[in-house]
Amino acid sequence: MTQPTHTDPGQSGGFLAEIKDAVTTRAALLVLGVLALQLAFITSYVGAFHQPKPSEIPIAVAAPAQPVAEQTAKQLSALPGKPLDPRAVQDEATALRQIQNRDVDGALIIDPAGTTDKLLVASGAGASLSQAIEQIVGVVEKTQGRGVRVVDVAPAAAGDGRGLTSFYLVVGWCVGGYLCAAILAISAGARPANIHRAVIRLGALLGYAIAAGLLGAVIADPILGALPGSLWALWGLGTLVVFAVGAITLAFQGLAGVVGIGLAILLVVVLGNPSAGGAYPYPLLPPFWKAIGPWLPPGAGTYAARSIAYFKGNDITGPLLVLSGWAVLGSAITMACAAGRRGKAGAPVGSGLPEGPDALPEPEVVR
């Protein structure tokens, strides 16, 4: 039996052979994928935030005489660029109720007997949004020789700087969701080998989501006093956000292996975070981000968290349905991928081995 001869790749093929040996084609493709993801991240965040512009902010207009309210609403709707979407309502009580129900983001209450009108805003829905309403209405009132008195009917909590705590809390939950799913994949292969493994992963993810939802809500309040509202409701929301994002990540991994982690980051971080309405609520975002935000987990979670904290849970059904839809879809795809593989094992993520057993190299026979 002869012993194999060991050669130095640098001597046999030079520096180029050394590079080929050090950086595999698979690694090079993954690096290119990371570069594309990084550029997409920059494009998405800069595109969403570089030039916030108010667009059709819903606002109620009330006056003692209905024709006055209707005429004012017509004037506001004719502003260049359509920054407002005004609608005349019966009285101040109706306007306030619409703000609390999250049907509108502000209300102008006209006082024909005086020269100062009242503007109702809700900074709990986002400080930048209430400030935009104040600025737009203030300019209009000034051109007519009138003043405006601002009343914040749903103010952000003292510890909730610019109303951003809801957004950051949801972002933290989302990060936990896809990292937990990624770790579950790293431990035993990106693709679940069978139905039992898929069920175990989803069960482990659910347990993590319950703990993460509770601890995140407790940190936000009462520990930091940054977000009011029902602790139980925030706990439930957090559990749903974490599980939905984790299930999406498991589904992507089932479909694409380790690349699925990048796809989850693309959906949740690159597209979801800048469109979530955190720093700039939906009416201030460009059309693309404004359109996709409510349908992605960060946006649905942020909107629901603000509703729980400042609006007594009003208008929360839609966001909860969105999150539930992602959770069900992710779980179903994860189970379907596991059923399709029928027990075929996958290589652990990061091992450098092909993820399909058929692609594993044949063992070398020493003669």
Image (cartoon, grey):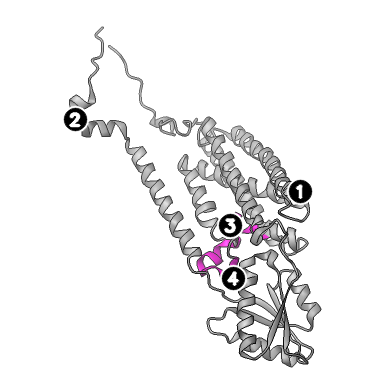
Identify the residue under disc 1: 222
Identify the residue under disc 3: 296
Identify the residue under disc 2: 14
Secondary structure state at the residue bearing disc 4: helix
The secondary structure making up most of the magenta span is helix
Q: Earlier in the sequence, mark 3 or mark 1?
A: 1
The answer to whether residue 62 of the structure is visible from this angle is yes
The residue depicted at 60 percent of the width and 36 percent of the height is: 198
The amino acid type found where label 2 is placed reads Gly
203 or 239, which lies in front?
A: 239
Secondary structure state at the residue bearing disc 1: helix
The amino acid type found where label 3 is placed reads Leu
The residue depicted at 71 percent of the width and 49 percent of the height is: 224
Secondary structure state at the residue bearing disc 3: loop
The answer to whether residue 343 of the structure is visible from this angle is no
Depicted 14 relative to depicted 318: above or below: above
- Magenta-colored span: 281-303
Q: Answer whether labels 1 and 2 touch (C-beta < 8 Å).
A: no
Task: Classify 10 Å Cα crowding around label 1: few (below 14), some (14-19), many (20 and above).
Answer: few
Q: Earlier in the sequence, mark 4 or mark 2?
A: 2
Depicted 126 relative to depicted 84: above or below: above
Q: Earlier in the sequence, mark 4 or mark 1?
A: 1
Identify the residue under disc 4: 283
Q: Position of residue 58 (x, y in %)?
A: 65, 76
